[in-house]
Image (cartoon, rainbow, N blue to C red):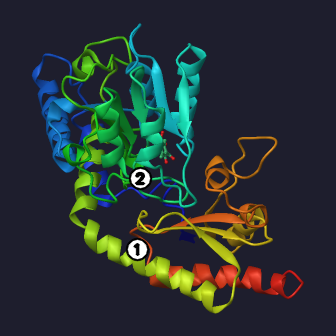
Amino acid sequence: MIYADNAATTRLDKAALEAMMPWLLEEYGNASQPYSFARKPRKALAEARAEIAECIGACPEEIFFTSGGTESDNWAIKRALGNGGRRFVITSQIEHHAVLNACAAVQRLGCPVSYLPVDGKGTVAPADLEKVLSDGCKLVSVMLANNEIGTIEPVKELARTAHEHGAMFHTDAVQAVGHIPVDVDDLGVDMLSASAHKFNGPKGVGFLYIRKGSPVGSFMDGGAQERRMRAGTENIASIVGMARALSQNIASMSRTESRLRAMEERLVLALDKAGIDYIRNGAEDHLPGNVSLSIKHVSGEMLLHRLDLKGICVSTGSACDSVETRVSHVIRAIGVPEDYAEGTIRITFGRDNDEEDAQTVADALLGILRPRTMGSLS
Ligand code: PLP
């Protein structure tokens, strides 16, 4: 099998798994208990928090563990809005549904939400944010990198613009953390969401960075864990695994990036040589390993299933989230022409892939596409 859907999830790092094991089998104590058996898990929790904080240029007290990206996004959006005062939220049209649906929820509670457009490459323009910002704006949430087309957003400029109007800034960095350099001070964000399973950590764990002093409420009521901000017994093993996975990925980031760029090139070159009519989605500045293609007059869904039969996992740009349209909100927002939009597939190479995999994916695609262009299916 060739797994080329690393934006969906990634394989658990072996060192991360090893780091997790003792906390599951031997040192399984509850970190909140006062006896000595809780001391080691409590220390492990503190060390993991410090390790993660260092990876993104934060202080340990600014890291709050969650169950993953969806929870972090919901927390940031729902709890940045207090009772009364500023109520206006601004986000973009191409956010993940974790953000879009959290925004829809606050909208139902009476908070106005504005959705910024993007250009043909999926980039949000700071000037467009400037146009809709008003003194009533409490929160701006724009992702650091898009999960479908890989576009990296100008978060630094957007955060600065939001701050000039007294608004807080949150970024969904779920696809970015562990893949591109992320520094919360350089970006100037107040909140940042991340998820371990996107960077070779375990599933069901993530974190929300909240800048010290930011007026953000607690998300889960219950015990006193996470400084009374997010109750619930801490998932020590997964948190330790997340910290290890993140450090490992960051240590090899630049080497991985050049390998991934070579895989992208190999794939695209093979399609170009064969004269395939396609649009490459996303900006020049995009996540390493992301190849989003909209191929003329084919069905992305058909391609996904045909590639699956050949043992290759990719994703489509069409979502099963709407009855009327099979084309995703991201592909719609960037304005991919109708005769290409349906033929969208997302190939996301990861650190376990190599150039040979890229060639195999290209050959498999050509094997499906070439006979079609000659009028019959292979
Ligand atoms: N945000 C983005 C950009 C994502 O790509 C995803 C996952 O696909 C999420 C949020 C949700 O993260 P999780 O699966 O950890 O809940």
Say which amino acid is labelled 1: Leu
In the picture, measured across the screen, residue 375 lies left or right of residue 235, that is right
In the picture, measured across the screen, residue 149 lies left or right of residue 214, that is right
| Tag shown at residue 260 | 1
Q: Which mark sits nearer the N-terminus, 1 or 2?
A: 2
Residue name at image x 40 percent, y 16 percent: 86
In this rendered view, identify the residue nearer to me: 43 or 112: 112
Q: Position of residue 8 (x, y in %)?
A: 52, 54
Residue name at image x 66 percent, y 81 percent: 364
Q: Position of residue 92 (x, y in %)?
A: 52, 41
Residue pointed to by mark 2: 153
Q: Position of residue 91 (x, y in %)?
A: 49, 36
Total count of labels: 2
Disc 2 residue crowd, few under 14, some 14–19, many 20+, Cα 10 Å: many
Which residue is outermost to the bottom?
273
Q: CA distance from mark 1 to mark 2?
A: 20 Å
Residue name at image x 17 percent, y 46 percent: 57
Disc 1 residue crowd, few under 14, some 14–19, many 20+, Cα 10 Å: many
Q: Position of residue 1 (x, y in %)?
A: 57, 72
Q: Secondary structure at mark 1?
A: helix
Label 2 beta carbon less than 8 Å to ligand 1: no
Q: Secondary structure at mark 2?
A: loop
Say which amino acid is labelled 2: Glu
In this rendered view, identify the residue nearer to me: 20 or 164: 164
In the picture, measured across the screen, residue 185 lies left or right of residue 241, that is left
Q: Residue 203 falls in which quadrant of the image?
A: top left
Does residue 235 appear in the picture of this structure? no
